[in-house]
Image (tube, grey):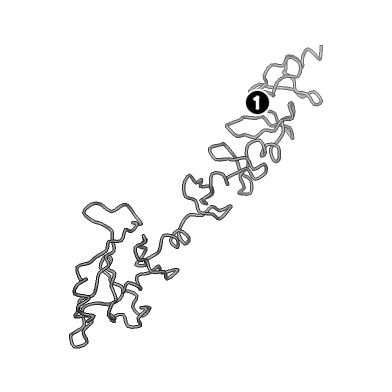
């Protein structure tokens, strides 16, 4: 009786959509798994066994990878075959059925387990990055998670610098770590190619390095110190007269 039922259903097949790990399937090379019934010869004890061996091998849910119980269907994908219930996610063991699946290195994953196991996660919040991530120090971040260590301002698409492998916006870095100009007391960050002058233990922005008397720039010129001030040679001579 079981054989008659299988004969009537033998022509029935079911295509199951799947996701390619690399690229997309084309019209002539569909990436699909096929569900079908076993040939009657596989079920008749008096006939030789058919050429079937469940790809789960010793992990086959039926115990014997060559067993084909009456009413069982088989799943075929690429060059391998499984019992229908054995064609399951390698992680959660849930049968794929008509759901999409993702093959990876001879293993089959349901979409949820594949994402959980292999998807890129943000180094800060540990949540999956679906799009628009940022890479810093070879580590992935959500754009919204990539922020200044001090003020939490977003740094995505902005200029920033780092200290001890931690990112800082220009303003916070200047306030926390940068040298300060002797003239204007503002930080000298160096971000964006800012040039500065250093003399002994003092530092100036290029634009702030001017004569205390005549206010002309001393960049690239000789100068004379006068207590806490710097003056050009001409102003120094005037002071001596």
Residue at label 1? 206
133, 92: nearer the viewer: 92
Q: Is residue 147 left or right of residue 186?
A: left
User: Residue 145 at what x, y percent from top left?
Assistant: 58, 47
The image quadrant where one finds the C terminus is top right
Place of residue 232 in the rendered image (x, y in percent of width and height, measured from the top left): 72, 18
Residue 125 image position (x, y, % from top left): 58, 53
Q: Quadrant of the N terminus?
A: bottom left
Q: Is residue 159 left or right of residue 120?
A: right
Q: Residues within 10 Å of mark 1 (few under 14, many from 20)?
A: some
Q: In this picture, is 98 found above or below 237? A: below
Within the image, what quadrant is residue 85 found in?
Answer: bottom left
Q: Determine the residue positioned at 41% across, 69% down.
A: 94
Residue at 77% in and 14% down: 237
The residue drawn where x is 19% and y is 72% is 8
The answer to which of 7 and 224 lies nearer the viewer is 7
Residue 146 position in % (x across, y down)? 57, 45
- Front-lying residue, 157 or 21: 21
Q: Could you say which quadrant of the image residue 178 lies in?
A: top right
């Amino acid at each position: 009786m079981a054989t008659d039922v299988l004969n009537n259903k033998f022509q029935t097949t079911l295509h199951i959509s799947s996701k390619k790990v690399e690229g997309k399937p084309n019209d002539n090379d569909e990436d699909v798994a096929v569900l079908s019934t076993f040939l009657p010869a596989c079920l008749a004890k008096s006939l030789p066994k058919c050429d079937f061996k469940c790809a789960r091998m010793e992990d086959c849910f039926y115990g014997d990878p060559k067993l084909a119980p009456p009413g069982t269907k088989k799943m075929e994908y690429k060059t391998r075959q499984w019992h229908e219930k054995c064609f399951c996610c390698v992680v959660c063991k849930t049968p794929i059925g008509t759901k999409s699946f993702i093959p990876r290195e001879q293993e089959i994953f349901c979409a949820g387990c594949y994402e959980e196991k292999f998807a890129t996660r943000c180094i800060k919040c540990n949540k999956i990055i679906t799009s628009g991530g940022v890479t810093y120090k070879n580590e992935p971040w959500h754009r919204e998670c990539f922020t200044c260590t001090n003020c939490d301002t977003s740094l995505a698409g902005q200029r920033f610098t780092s200290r001890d492998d931690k990112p800082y916006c220009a303003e916070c870095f200047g306030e926390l770590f940068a040298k300060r100009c002797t003239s204007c007391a503002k930080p000298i960050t160096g971000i964006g190619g800012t040039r500065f002058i250093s003399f002994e233990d003092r530092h100036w922005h290029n634009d702030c390095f001017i004569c205390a008397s005549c206010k002309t720039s001393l960049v690239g010129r000789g100068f004379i110190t006068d207590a806490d001030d710097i003056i050009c040679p001409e102003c120094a001579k005037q002071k001596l007269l």
